[in-house]
Amino acid sequence: MKQLIQRAEESHHLTKKEIILLLQDKEAASLLFQAADRVRKKYVGNEVYLRALIEFSSYCKNNCCYCGLRRDNQQARRYRLTPQQIVSTARQAAQIGYKTVVLQSGEDAWFSSAIMAEIIREIKKLGLAITLSIGEKTREEYAAYRQAGADRYLLRIETTDKALYAKWDPGMSWQNRARCLRDLKDLGYEVGSGSLVGLPGQTLESLADDLLFFKSLPVDMAGIGPFIPHPQTPLAQETPEGHLELSLKVMAVMRLLLPDINIPATTAMESLHPQGRLLALQSGANVIMPNVTDELFQELYDLYPGKAHTGPNAAQYVRDLTHKLAAIGRTVHFSTGFHGEYLKNNPA
Ligand code: SAM
Ligand code: SF4
């Protein structure tokens, strides 16, 4: 196992069989995390890119079985920020020092293509890079957002196991989700994808397929999140046990395979373990997306129970984070954090 990890650290290549071996192995996990940490340091440095997350609507027309925002969850308390509120939240983030915002929501038809384009144009006037995470759209819609100034798009494939996707994402089409990712790449977005780890019925084989799918696109970013069961969904009886450890392994293998991409330490990891983000940052991750949404709405954006909150003071959160990161030898970096930025600024 040691040799396999060493070879992957140098070649950034693994077969599907080798990926499965790495994910299976319990003893070699710490060697895997250390190797991913070294690759992270070499290709993206010690800086941790911060991106301000704005969760602007909890309405969703979809019915993903794992998500608390699913359409059939009658108990979900829905909210929708106005375009003015979204822009003003972005302005506050810029005042703290953020250079980039992530606009995320359920699939909410109230935000037409024209309204989204207007929000994007207003935020661009603040000099911020913009990432969208608003689900599946037509190619024309993606083109309109891009033209308005959107730079990046996050759309997790969730799983490359098509039967599993059909089961847990009823009414949606895996082929359409993959089409979205191809269109986004084609239109010149930096593309982020990712997987949910721990979905009932998911195999190590399908997680290996996910990793090879990300390499084949290739993605510019990828977020790996442990699945955390929500009590008001059909998957309420599931347990998140083991999902964090496996997510960290999948993430670490991804760092070996795609050495220079941006990998967030996800909120779901922090939600399962008080040090979840720090563990992720020491196992291949280099990005944190602090939530800058008004605290009241952070609570209503209820994807899963125990979702980590950033507290009432976004500026204080960054100061505290800076101290925590310093303790593990890392620095907060308020840059746009585009793919390849570190190597460009620090040629070998
Ligand atoms: N609606 C858009 C979409 O689905 O792409 C963006 C927002 S959606 C809430 C963002 C991500 O939340 C999804 O891609 C999914 O992986 C994650 N998520 C949803 N429910 C979750 C759960 N129970 N545990 C962990 N992550 C979850
Ligand atoms: Fe909607 Fe996204 Fe949740 Fe699915 S994961 S129900 S698309 S918010």
Image (cartoon, rainbow, N blue to C red):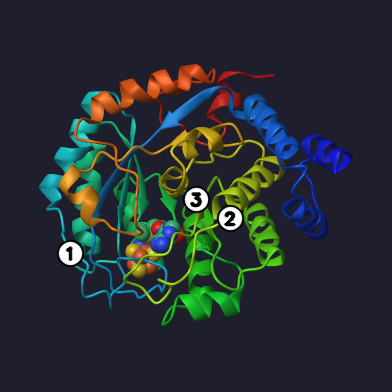
Asked which secondary structure carries label 2, the reply is: loop
If the image is split into quadrants, where does the C terminus sit? Answer: top right
Instruction: Examine the image and state in which quarter residue 284 appears.
Output: top right
* Residue designated by label 2: 242
The disc placed on residue 191 is 3
Q: Residues within 10 Å of mark 3 (few under 14, many from 20)?
A: many
Instruction: Examine the image and state in which quarter residue 303 appears.
Output: bottom left
Q: Earlier in the sequence, mark 2 or mark 1?
A: 1
Horizontal and vertical percent for residue 254?
65, 46
Q: Please state if 39 lies on the left or on the right of 324 as rendered.
A: right
Towards the viewer: 148 or 289: 289
Q: Amino acid at mark 3?
A: Val
Q: Amino acid at mark 2?
A: Gly
Dots 1 and 3: beta carbons under 8 Å? no
Q: Amino acid at mark 1?
A: Arg
Asked which secondary structure carries label 1, the reply is: loop
Q: Earlier in the sequence, mark 3 or mark 2?
A: 3
Asked which secondary structure carries label 3, the reply is: strand
Q: Residues within 10 Å of mark 2 (few under 14, many from 20)?
A: few
Instruction: Examine the image and state in which quarter residue 99 appears.
Output: top left
Identity of the residue furthest to the right in this view: 3
* Residue designated by label 1: 77
